[in-house]
Amino acid sequence: MIRALNLFRTRAAMAHNMLRAGPASATQKRFLSIHEHLSMGLLNKYGINTPKFVPAKSAEEAYEAAKSFGGKPVVIKAQVLAGGRGKGHFDNGLQGGVHLVNSPEEVRDLAQKMLGAKLITKQTGAAGRACNAVMIAEARAPAHEYYAAILNDRVKQLPVLIASNQGGMSIEEVAKENPDAIVTTPIDYTKGLDMKTAEGIAHKLGFSSSKLEKEAAETFVNLYKLYEEKDATQVEINPLAESKDGEVLCMDAKLGFDDNADFRQEDVFKLRDTTQEDPSEVEAGKFGLNFIKLDGNIGCLVNGAGLAMATLDVLSLKGGKPANFLDVGGGANAAAVKKAFELLLESKDVRAIFVNIFGGIMRCDVIAEGIIQATKELQLTIPLVVRLQGTKEAEAKKLIQDSGMKIFAYDLLDEAAQAAVQKAETQ
């Protein structure tokens, strides 16, 4: 169970942060994440109970939203796609992205400080992410907090419902400190999650009455229905609360969706917020490129996620520091290769470029044409090391040789990587 949790989170983090691609990509794609208020709205459409909430994009909207709760205490939450918001801080000095407040005036003041500022959490890095919206939600005091998530277990090759009576905290910590507190239930694709099974899970969690057990079971069934019908990769509720006034509520929601299903989930993918993503990655996606910035000085252009990761490893073993992860996939053309070079050269730290292509679906001569075009049009001045193997390899090497440009070609990966590291060091 712990293995399933860790594997899912590792894959999800890599996918979301490193392998995002646009609709034109023929390469591997992964997950879409959406803001909390949008996730809560989707839960409501599936009959899943949440606290009442109103999103706002200005301080005045937040003020009016708070007034609509009739003077009751409310929670204001920064809408930023990152975990740890409550313990984060804004670049203007405001501490915390989640606050319990008692008046609309206080909501307005906090919204003014949050909106337009960057929230920095353990997941965003030092740069933080812009807060362009806040969510005002009714404050519903929990009598007890639980955890529930549906995700795909790669070991069992089935979706699983992971539940615990220790919610409101890191599920990884619960799994480490008290694994017996976690109930893991595989779900048969052909049968789905039935009420009898769901009621059994709710009973194990220890809800205080049979009425609340039934409400929790209905919540589990509807969460799975959402997971299945919306091509979700993650449905995580933390906390799932038994409120003091006697209801089962999803107090927070984190949803992820399979990018490969974008053609049949248009309503969900319209909810994507590209302002939460790196502009370079968004631009790369338009050309079918998978791109993520790193902090090194060797720009990398590779085809295939596996080969790209191996290339980064080899450069590191040779003492180099990759400046990016860039996978051009199997459907790139000369224009996409040129765009890839433009993205690499955006960083002033790049001292050399290493192109490592294994031609299968992607032809080496197409890559060579793109390299030559980019070198000419971008007036490339830093060293360019190229390794091309596979389909149309001979034609590609001839194109490079006949170009008369200063391109360093190698056949062996070790030699090419070593050359890239040396040239970056001497620039």
Image (cartoon, grey):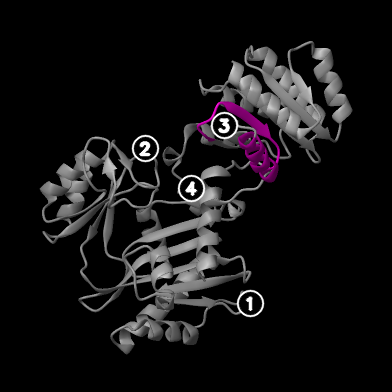
Which SS class for mark 4? loop
Label disc, if present, on residue 60 of the rendered structure: none
- Dot 1 falls on a residue whose secondary structure is loop
Disc 3 + disc 2, Cβ < 8 Å: no
N-terminal-most mark, 2 or 1? 2
296 falls in the magenta region? yes
Q: Which mark is residue 321?
A: 3
Structural distance between the alpha carbons of marks 2 and 1: 45 Å
Between marks 4 and 3 in the image, the one whose residue lies nearer the viewer: 3
Count of numbered badges drawn on the protein: 4
According to the image, label 1 marks what residue?
190
Q: Is residue 232 among what the camera can see?
A: no
Q: Secondary structure at mark 3?
A: loop
Q: Is residue 202 visible?
A: yes
Dot label at residue 126: 2
Reply yes or no: does residue 263 show up in magenta: no
Disc 3 crowd rating (10 Å Cα; few below 14, some 14-19, many 20+) is many
Tell me which numbered mark, 1 or 4, is placed earlier along the sequence.
Answer: 1
The reply to whether discs 4 and 2 touch (Cβ–Cβ < 8 Å) is no
Position of residue 325 in the picture relative to residue 170 (left or right): right
Q: Give the percent coordinates (x, y) of residue 70.
A: 13, 60
Q: Which residue is mark 4?
A: 270
Please name whichever residue, 16 or 126, is drawn nearer the observer in this view of the structure.
126
Quick check: 222 above or below 327? below
The amino acid beneath tag 2 is Ala
> Over which residues does the magenta segment extend?
293-317
Q: Position of residue 330 (x, y in %)?
A: 73, 40
Q: Amino acid at mark 1?
A: Thr
Comparing marks 2 and 1, which lies closer to the viewer?
2
Q: Nearer the viewer, residue 147 or 233?
A: 147
